[in-house]
Amino acid sequence: MTKLQAKNIVKHFDHNGNSVVALDGINLNVEEGDFICIVGPSGCGKSTFLNIVAGLEKPDSGEILLNGKPISDPGPDRTMVFQEGALFPWLKVIDNVEFGLKMAGIPTEERREISHRYLDMMQLTKFSDSYTYQLSTGMKQRVAIARALAMDPEILLMDEPFAALDSQTRDLLLVELQLIWERTKKTIIFVTHNISESVILGNKVEVFKNRPSRIKKEIVIDYRRPRLAEDENLQKYYHQILDELKSEVIARTKDEIQ
Amino acid sequence: MTGNIPLKKSRGSIEDAANAALLIATFIGVWQIVFMLGIWPKISLPSPAMVAETFAKIILNGSLEQSIGITLARLLGAFAISITLGTLIGFVMIKFKGFGKTLNSFSAGLLSFPSIAWVPFSILLIGFDEFGIMFVVVMSSIFSIMISTYSSIRNIPPIYVDAARNMGAHGVSLFRHVTIPAATPSLIIGLRQAWSFAWHAIIGAEILMSIVGLGHILSVGREFLDMSQVIASMITIFTIGLLVDRFILNKLEDKVRKKWGLDNHR
């Protein structure tokens, strides 16, 4: 079943008074239970696309359909895990996780039950009453994932959530995220500039073309899980994506120099 | 980790108290020496002991207590008005961007406007009464509250708002659960500044407009050439200002900073 559909999404940016085409007709079908990775050169508009799906930005034309219905505003059916710094420093870990539930008017007792479940899943129970500054970057991202999952969204959006992590922590979370995906059967769209990340996580990898951005190629990765970063068999997918991306990165660099 | 904190804190506060005592002792010592050198006549510069005597007198006859009570009552009343109105206007400034920007520039100009300069205006507009004095205090502190509300909210990292909207917060709930708490550390700094403006203003206004209050006993001291009373009033004003800043506003700020982890990046 099609969970989410992006139809011909176009978005312009104002850059020093000139209108720049950021997204030039993005079409994407996300099936229920898909783990989609969007990979592309930095500045190619992949985060913009995710923000549009989240409803945080509006497209200039085109529409996003969730379960066949068009969306326009942000909503808890599409929760986002941001790159970093999106946790609320004035709330304890547990209250961060419960924030969206509270906004939805869910009674305290039920909130506690849900937040405990996800804190437990992310191995954060010990830190429920900590404030976010007391956590490492990796733990903060676990909280952010717990917070997003607690909303039980139709679709989970992740915008380079592991970009700020050290590589050991990232490898660990890459495995954990696959396990969570298998356990919760969530539909996930994961944006990254890191090819290995996309190969490890995605069952489909969408390669974005440099500005004006379109989907250049979809690569299906049908390989057993949990996939590990050091798995040699993933190399062929890695190179396949790299080949697609190389010319884009070169084009991007040229753009920037000019 | 947590075991060390109270220990460190109590050691720190004993050290602070010792330093403060040393500073006060030095000040009184220098004062006594200058007095004994006889550069100024006694009437112009009394000794610490003479001022202490005056203190005893105004404490015993109740005039100090009465003055402090009246001054603080006026100040708190006016400051409450200032905070309420200033915050509300600040919210309106956020809501209507063009208006906010213009008013912000004007308020910044009025921030440096001397509080004493409001006095003649207030006397003619409102009169020689409590409300006249409170008006001066409100006008001297409200712009600081307005500017601080406006800029604190404008400077909230947009990612907090994005994250909150993403989780279904909007309108009043967004404001209450994200805008206000996110702006709090910065709002408290504004509050401290406004308090100091209000404190300047109340004493100035009382010197010129009042027949009771701390500013008044200060100016009575001058009229009766009673330097001991002038100094005793000044010490009282200084002490209250210090206590409020140190034990209320500073504590509040420390608490919020600690909760946010803003003091942990050393």
Image (spheres, coloured by chain):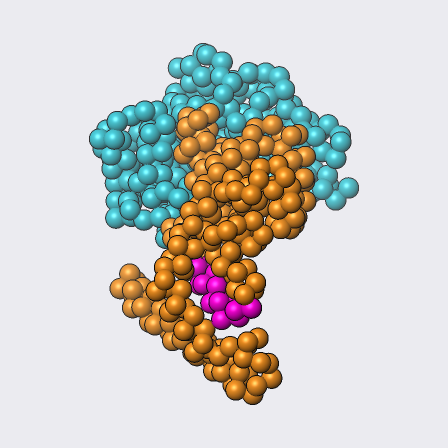
Identify the residue at horizontal 28%, vertical 61% (top origin): B2
Q: Nearer the viewer, residue B201 or A73?
A: B201
Residue A66, percent across and down? 45, 17
In the current view of this chain or complex, which residue is farthest to the bottom? B37
**Chain cyan in the figure, letter:** A
Count of marks, rendered view: 0
Which stretch appears magenta? B225-242
User: From the viewer's perspective, is residue A66 above or below residue B118?
Assistant: above
Residue A185, percent across and down? 33, 27
- Asked whether residue B240 is drawn in magenta, I would say yes
Identify the residue at horizontal 48%, vertical 57% (top origin): B214
Identify the residue at horizontal 65%, vertical 30% (top origin): B99
Please indicate whether residue A209 sits to the left or right of residue A147 in the image: right
User: From the viewer's perspective, is residue A28 above or below residue B253?
Assistant: above
Identify the residue at horizontal 55%, vertical 60% (top origin): B219
Residue B232, percent across and down? 47, 67
Colour in which chain B is drawn: orange
Residue A209, percent across and down? 62, 31
Q: Nearer the viewer, residue B105 or A231?
A: B105
Quarter residue B139 falls in: top right
Q: Nearer the viewer, residue B154 or A237?
A: B154
Quarter residue A128 falls in: top left
